[in-house]
Amino acid sequence: MYSKSLLIAICALVLCASCVTLPWSNAPAAQEVNLAFTIEKNLLVISTASVQGRRGRFVFGSAEPRTVFDATFAHSVPLPSGSVVLQLSEKESVATNPLIADLHGAADAILGADIWGNHAVSIDYVSGLITYQKEGIHPEAMTLYRFSGEPKVNVVVDGKTISAIVDTTSPDTLVLPRGAGAARRATASVMVADTNFGTIDIAYGDIAAPRVGNRVLSKFLVTIDYGRREVGLWRDPRMP
């Protein structure tokens, strides 16, 4: 569900908005938190977040079970061992027990599912907002997918339906396991949530399971309810 201000902004951008059934309801402001993000190198960087007053390149990681801080950044803050308070916005903070690892300059932190607990988040790529929904998902007009483990949706690749992880740390379209073959680029016919993308560029890489990335996800309003274990996709008419 989205706030009234966000709903008005979206309606103003959609042609013939009165003809479109929107997949959310108005909600009390106290039940949602809107977090601004920028898209950098096709990754979602939450610009409102900070830790101990220090901002950084904090990337939203939809498929990461736990938050990870880059070792160099953690040392420079410095972060305490154990629980860390992450300030999501001026009025909203959460505690996390993060992992520390070398992120090789890709980010100062990857914010994982532990940040949201059993709540939901919605990603509006056009407006640059992640909405933290404390009352969960409102699925009207959305295509819903149940998942266990990482959030997943069904993707039809060259006529075959596969389950793919919703991975906002992937700047790509779709990445498939390379198996015994070499890592490579290829083309394939791809359909997601009844949206036919036609023949698009995809990748084969060193991964265990298929992953759908931001170049495809950005065509949708994406909601992930970590408590109910559901992903909702709604084709965004503002995106070509």
Image (cartoon, rainbow, N blue to C red):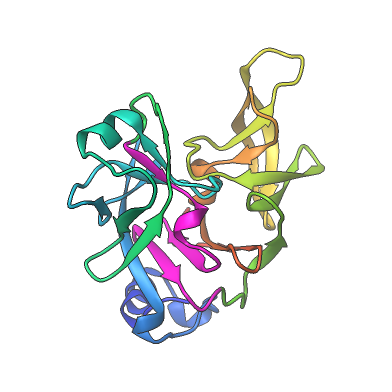
Viewer-side residue, 219 vs 1: 1
- What residue range appears in magenta? 108-136
Residue located at (51% from left, 63% from top): 117
Residue at 38% in and 52% down: 83
Report whether 145 appears left or right of 122.
right
Is 29 in front, or is 237?
29
Location of residue 189 by image quarter = top right
Residue 2 screen position, x and y as percent = 42, 76
Residue 76 located left or right of residue 162: left
Query: In this rendering, does residue 237 appear at all?
Result: no
How many numbered discs?
0
Question: Would residue 124 be counted in the magenta stretch?
Answer: yes
Image location of residue 39, percent across then percent down = 34, 45
Q: Is residue 171 above or below residue 66?
A: above
Q: Residue at x 28, y 54 (%)?
A: 49
Q: Nearer the viewer, residue 172 or 48?
A: 48
Asked whether residue 131 is drawn in magenta, I would say yes
